[in-house]
Image (spheres, helix red, strand yellow):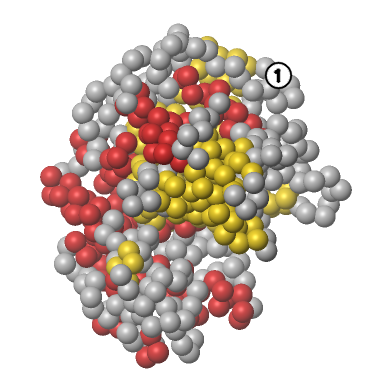
Amino acid sequence: MKISLNLRRFYPLAFMILASSALSCSAETGQAVSPEKLHGNSQNPASSKVSPATVGSSVAASVHPGSAWQKYSPDMEQLFRNYIRPDAPGCVAGVYQEGELVLSGAYGMANLDHGIPLSDSSRFYMASVSKQVTAAAAGLLVVRGKLDLDKPVSEYIDGWPEWAEGITVSHLFNHTSGLPDIYDLMAIAGISLSDVMSIDDYMSVFFNGESLKHLPGQRYSYTNSGYTTLAKLVETVSGDDFSVFVDNEILGPLGMSASHFHDDRHRIIPNRVISYAPARGLSEEPLFSDVDPETDDSTLPEPVFRQTYLSNFQGVGPGGLYSTVRDWARWEALWSGGYSALALEEERVAEFQKLKELMTRQMVINGDTLDYAMGLDITQWQGQVMQGHSGSFMGFRTDVRRFPEHGLALLTLCNREDANPGRSNREMARIFLKEHFEAFLLPYQGVYRSEELQIDYTITVEQGTLKLHRRLSPNGLIREDAPDMWRAGSWDLVFQRNEEGEISGFLVSTGRSKEVAFDRVPELIIP
């Protein structure tokens, strides 16, 4: 049975649960996909109905009772509640398990001029999330033996500048080339992003430079120039336009018919999303900003927006990909190993398997392993392996996070400059991987005492994260920056371990007070 609520006018789905057979089965096994796999719990969740959010007098919600995922819809709607407005841009979020889109939500508007709502078929500019597809295109040529990671770029591209002679192909993938950033150079040179430019035009911008930021391979330094060069390498080696090669060799075989690299400003994009930014200074009211969904209960004023979309922009490589939350499921099926659902030939499956192994290979520099591999950040977050990338350009904010150990991926696409999709994805992860996170966090829970200040702090595990309880202050979330390095607002906490590897205390720094020691009090029990 399908329950449908429709009030005075159509509004984007406050939340959608996709439970059709095409979207509720594992791409690899064909068996039903259940969120209980993420939680290590085989029991069926209790049936519940969704309470749709109300936005003025406009709301439309669609619910498929019986889906194992429907119990999460109130949490998700609460997380994105500030985007549910009929007169503002917003976000679309997708949840993928084993390469299947099992949950999606659309909040806000795709086009304010025409009142078009967002949906999971809205085509977003993906910004730097595009880099993993660019890396896949160039990486496929590496797998086929047509591009050598260890060869200098100058062997492939005519006119490559002498001052960049030491850069190899591998340096381009992981941002260790030392090339100055192409968009920074354009800004300095007074070249508008609205100027109509080809790949060769973009290449000429940094070809006219004079020096590298550092020697190639010496350190990580994020630069869009490397991925512009990778797109040019694909053209040079394959003989095809970059967008054509990607269509024929990656997007086409994966069945991503609603995705493309936009190198032709005249091309029609069905369901195109327009981007916006708050028009600061036009209102005396505070503008919308992302808030912590666990601690903020305020009702924020509706902001005034200005359009930031650049219709002439057609750069590809560092960005340039357009896609949808629904179409992205095909890309996640590739990463989850769902080849049977993609109906790929055996030869193509073997190539893509090698490609994935190549793209997740991390470089070691001066004894340290780089987080950035090929178009992907690969880190440990709250004890789980996390792959992904974020993007930010002309008012679009995008983020994808993949947890390969759990077959889970999260994609949030926003068309408002003040959105924070990276935070949204992490908050979603705390919902779906709560038990795994809490098992990792439990050793941090306890009472800690500063003998210097004669004060106790308590750290507890709540809702898949840590919370700090302190005197005369509200309880605060503690966010992980790196292993044993956490942040609570403006406070930095570095946890200490004893010889057995157990948490023994932490050092807190804030403002001009540095490394105030707190020791764990093992005999105290948290009330």
Residue at position x 69%, y 45% in the image: 289
At a point 30% along the width and 70% down the height, the residue shown is: 367
Res 423 → quadrant: top right
Q: Residues within 10 Å of mark 1 (few under 14, many from 20)?
A: few
Q: Residue furthest right?
A: 284
**Residue placed most toward the observer, 460 or 64:** 460
Image quadrant holding the C terminus, namely top right
Residue 377 horizontal/vertical position (percent): 39, 56
Residue 40 image offset from top left, x and y in percent: 32, 26
Given the current orientation, which residue lies at the most extreme top position?
1
Residue 461 vertical position relative to residue 516 in the rendered view, above or below? above
User: What residue would you read off at disc 1?
Assistant: 8
Looking at the rendered image, the quarter that the N terminus falls into is: top left
Residue 172 location, quadrant: bottom left
Q: Nearer the viewer, residue 1 or 511?
A: 511
Q: How many marks?
A: 1
Spot occupied by residue 121 in the image (x, y as percentages of width and height): 48, 37
Q: In the rendered image of this protein, does residue 501 appear above or below residue 203? A: above
Residue in view at x 48 percent, y 48 percent: 505
In the image, what residue occupies the spot 25% across and 52% down?
A: 356
Quarter location, residue 41: top left
Residue 425 or 322: which is nearer the viewer? 425
Q: Position of residue 96 (x, y in %)?
A: 38, 35
Q: Is residue 213 above or below residue 112?
A: below
The reply to whether residue 429 is in sight is no
**380 is higher (above) or lower (below) than 371:** above
**Which element type, helix, strand or loop, lies under badge 1?**
loop
Identity, as a three-letter code, of the amino acid under mark 1: Arg
In the depicted view, which residue is nearer to us: 474 or 20? Answer: 474
Residue 140 in view (yes/no): yes
